[in-house]
Amino acid sequence: AYKRFSELLPKEERENACSARVPKSQILTLPELRANPFQHRICRVFSTSDDGDDSMSFEDFLDMLSAFSDSATPDIKSHYAFRIFDFDDDGVLDRKDLEKLVNCLTGHGEESRLSNAEMEQLIRNILEESDIDKDGTINLSEFQHVISRSPDFTSSFKIVL
């Protein structure tokens, strides 16, 4: 992990990789993130940058790899998945978050975009299935409850370096 992190830094900064920050643009060059539709959210969630530039320290990078590793618990994986899908960072998945989530998964091209009626029906179905307290949003525990019934989630939520 240290080797991969330091390779993202300019040569002159590699000696001090532990204290350096890698810009988001460099993190996104990782082949493991390049094709991920949530690449920008992943950087946002794992970055501890005070500047809001989504750059990563070595510790941030390790946290990201750890959460996406095979050894991460289902609770840890679902916690980070929830944070990645919570686009407005308000602690719940609301209709806007779900719409962005679906658009990320289906692509942004006109031919792959769902119609308004299809999107509305899909969001209604997701909320019907997941919104246990019927408040119109999905909180972390509701999300974790749904994820616990998905046997493929833990094995598919990973990045292997």
Image: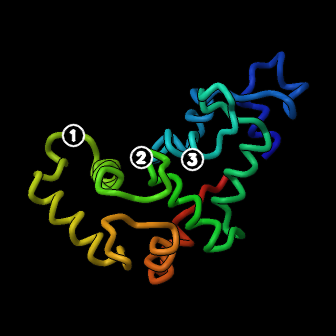
Question: Where residue 155 sits: x, y (%)?
Answer: 56, 71
In depth, the one of 98 and 151 nearer the eye is 98
Residue appearing at x 21%, y 68% in the figure: 124
| Callout 2–callout 3 Cβ contact below 8 Å | no
Tell me if residue 114 comes above or below residue 155 in the rendering. Answer: above
Look at mark 3 in the image and give the residue it sits on: 32
Residue appearing at x 90%, y 25% in the figure: 15
Question: Where residue 70 sits: x, y (%)?
Answer: 67, 68
Question: Where residue 149 sits: x, y (%)?
Answer: 45, 83
- Left or right of 79, for residue 66: right
- Tell us which disc is closer to us: 2 or 3: 2
Look at mark 2 in the image and give the residue it sits on: 37
Look at mark 1 in the image and give the residue it sits on: 109
- Label 2 packing within 10 angstroms: few (<14), some (14-19), many (20+): some
Residue appearing at x 63%, y 59% in the figure: 68
Label 3 secondary element: helix
In depth, the one of 78 and 91 nearer the eye is 91
- Label 1 packing within 10 angstroms: few (<14), some (14-19), many (20+): few
Quarter occupied by residue 110: top left
CA distance separating discs 2 and 3: 11 Å
Label 1 secondary element: loop
- Tell us which disc is closer to us: 3 or 1: 1
The color scheme shown is rainbow
Identity of the residue furthest to the top in this view:
12
